[in-house]
Amino acid sequence: MAEKILEIKGLKKYFPLPNGQVVKAVDGVDLELYAGETLGLVGESGSGKSTIAYVLVGMYEATDGDIIFKGDNIAKTGLHRTLKQRGDIQIVFQDPGSSLNPRRTIEQSIMVPLEIHTSLSKQEAKKQVRKLLEEVGLPSEVAEGYPRTLGGGERQLVSVARALATNPSFMILDEPTSALDVSVQAKVINKLIDLQKEFRLSYLFITHDLSLMRNVADRVAILYLGRLCELASTADFFQKPLHPYTQMLLSSVPVATTEEEKMKPVKVLSTGEIPSPVNVPPGCAFHLRCRHKKPICLREQPTRREIFPGHYVWCHLFEQKESPGSGK
């Protein structure tokens, strides 16, 4: 069993509004991440994916819950983390066009974390910048240019190089390819996989693209309105999805061949839209869109149940010893 480097327990992040209401962006999430693995976190817009990322990286402090990273609870530390903790957890944002300063050269952008987190001399740091660019598959002369001179995929690889500058063990990839052309996405994904093996990185890969998860993630977690619905190994997740929301998502994934079509669950119509996190419905947050809901779903929030080894679901339709296929 690989070493557990991250454990999230009951994580909550609420944002108070001026009118007294509260946005429950993340509402009691439990997750674990193991050394060297890629955990996919999937959900619709507004599900709380990016909020989890920002709490993990220290941009927000948790409202409640624990984040145990390598033995230390960092849930409440926010921007007051140690230099080592800040360097060990890095994030690659969705849009490299906005995450890179257009007035700085590529070298200047990558030099910033090197100046903060290392004791390299200026000349040594300049050499390290070029080494990092080559590590991510870019020519070293890119360092002299500005972000506007690069394509979207190249800018995202620069962002990856900047994240690697602190020698992290855990990287959060927040929709890292969704702003890129399809022709460029594969190059970036393949490079991320290569870098993970080379540097022994652990990834939290945040996306709304389930097709991407099939080829990237070791395990997949589904998030809905700030709460988890299902968590399983990638193989189990795609072969035997349990939660009605998961089945709805998978049945909507476009496929290219009849073989892939046969692997999809029975078509489940996507009805309604995700409610506002300001007015989270009582009980199961998905019950307004679920065709299988029972009276208990309207009253009680479901708890985590392990249906198969390592396959968890938060749903009243499944009891601990009940056959998942029964639907009872």
Image (tube, rainbow, N blue to C red):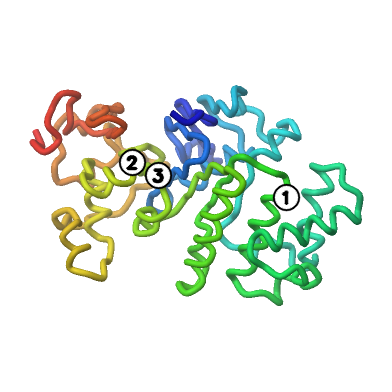
The quadrant where residue 135 appears: bottom right
Residue in the picture at 35% in, 39% down: 280
Q: Secondary structure at mark 2?
A: strand
Choose between 153 and 30: the one closer to the eye. 153
Q: Which residue is mark 1?
A: 165
Is 204 left or right of 132, judged from the image as shown?
left
State which tag comes first along the sequence, 1 or 3: 1
| Circle 3: residue type | Asp
Residue 224 visible in the displayed image: no
Contact flag, marks 2 and 3 (Cβ < 8 Å):
yes
Could you tell me which quadrant the C terminus lies in? Answer: top left
Residue holding disc 3: 218
Pick the residue in front: 238 or 284: 238
Decide which of 69, 245 is in the foreground and name it.
Answer: 69
Label 2 belongs to which residue? Answer: 233
Quick one: label 3, few (<14), some, or many (20+) residues within 10 Å? some
In the rendered structure, the answer to whether residue 41 lies left or right of residue 110 reads left
Q: State whether residue 155 is above or below residue 233.
A: below
First in residue order: circle 2 vs circle 3: 3
Q: Quadrant of the N terminus?
A: top left
Amino acid type shown at disc 2: Ser
Alpha carbon of mark 1 to alpha carbon of mark 3: how far? Answer: 25 Å
What x and y, as percent, mark residue 240? 21, 44
